Image (spheres, rainbow, N blue to C red):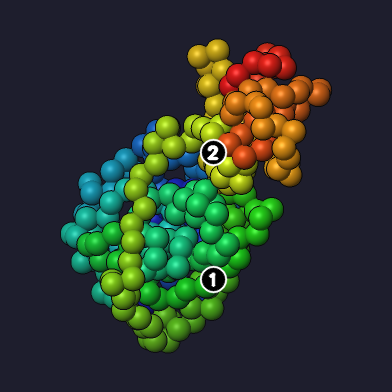
Amino acid sequence: MKRYLFIGSVEFSGSCLTALLKRDINIVGIMCPEKEAAKINNDYFDLGITAREFGKEVKYIKKIKDEIGFIKEKRPDIIFVLGFSQIIPKAILDIPQIGCIGSHPSLLPQNRGRHPIIWAIANGLTKSGITLFWMDEGVDSGDIWRQKEFEIAISDNATTIYEKVKTMSVEMIKEGIYDLEQGTINRTKQDDTKANYWRKRTVKDGEIDWRMSGKRIYDLVRSLAKPYVGAHCVYKEQEKKIWNVNMINESDDFNNFEPGKVISVDGDSIMVRTGDGVVLLTDHAFSELPAKGEYL
């Protein structure tokens, strides 16, 4: 029976860990950063909650690079690193007899790098996927273990895509763990010539530029839905979160209005001129609603 060690820190990690703990396998260690050390978005998850349900203990950590001794003591054959933002140093990658399995929510080798769910939706992609891969010293560049594709519908946002990623990852783990136990180690080398890298997003990337098209604004807003931080605009020198917008069909009725102008306010809904039409803000954090004719 193989020896497995699990490292993670988010809701996605908890779903994958549950799937593994339900298998009849030998999990010799579970590691999770303390919340203060996680430095992640709102989806931090204490793996101790899941572990205790199965009679397991969790090793809480600050920096993974300081845990080489602990990991060596566990003598893992395979380390799962699922939903963990810290860089795994080579000294740890070299410990397991078989290797470390990581995850990336894209169809590797495409879209390596940072914030793949956010960038995929913000860029208007209609498909993506989840890849479980054998980690190396590169960025999302290791051999592929398992991979599945999913569609990104126009109605999807970060919340629904995050759920797709969790569900598919659990399915892939359930399918693949039997192979690992039997000694079947699937590896498919990535084609580096087809790779691209997405950069780390900044706060500025989440700010709505009303000169953008309504579709681009819609994509930006849905890309930053929970568990992420939300898109925003600036009103009276304050950042205002925008959680949902509706696209309105283009019309010549708005040709004489500049982008960012508030066309109307109806209840909590705010209609704003964009680069090619208007959008309706339906879920937002305006405590003081702007007046018709003001600018965002």
Residue depicted at x 47% and y 73%: 147
Q: Nearer the viewer, residue 56 or 182?
A: 182
Amino acid type at image mark 2: Met
Residue 252 image point, x, y percent: 72, 37
Q: How many marks?
A: 2
Amino acid type at image mark 1: Glu
| Mark pair 2, 1: CA separation | 29 Å
Q: Secondary structure at mark 1?
A: strand
Q: Nearer the viewer, residue 234 or 35?
A: 234
Quarter in which the N terminus is drawn: bottom left
Q: Which mark is first along the chain, 1 or 2? A: 1
Residue 17 located left or right of residue 134? right
Q: Is residue 31 visible?
A: no
Viewer-side label of 2, 1? 2
Q: Are marks 2 and 1 in contact (CB under 8 Å)?
A: no
Q: Is residue 98 visible?
A: yes
Q: Secondary structure at mark 2?
A: loop
- The residue to which callout 2 is attached is 212
| Residue 23 location, quadrant | bottom right
Residue 20 located left or right of residue 198? right
- The residue to which callout 1 is attached is 149
Query: Does residue 2 sit above or below 141 in this rendering?
Result: below
Residue depicted at x 39% and y 86%: 184
Residue 250 located left or right of residue 49? right
Disc 1: CA contacts within 10 A as few (<14), some (14-19) or many (>=20): some
Residue 141, numbered label = none
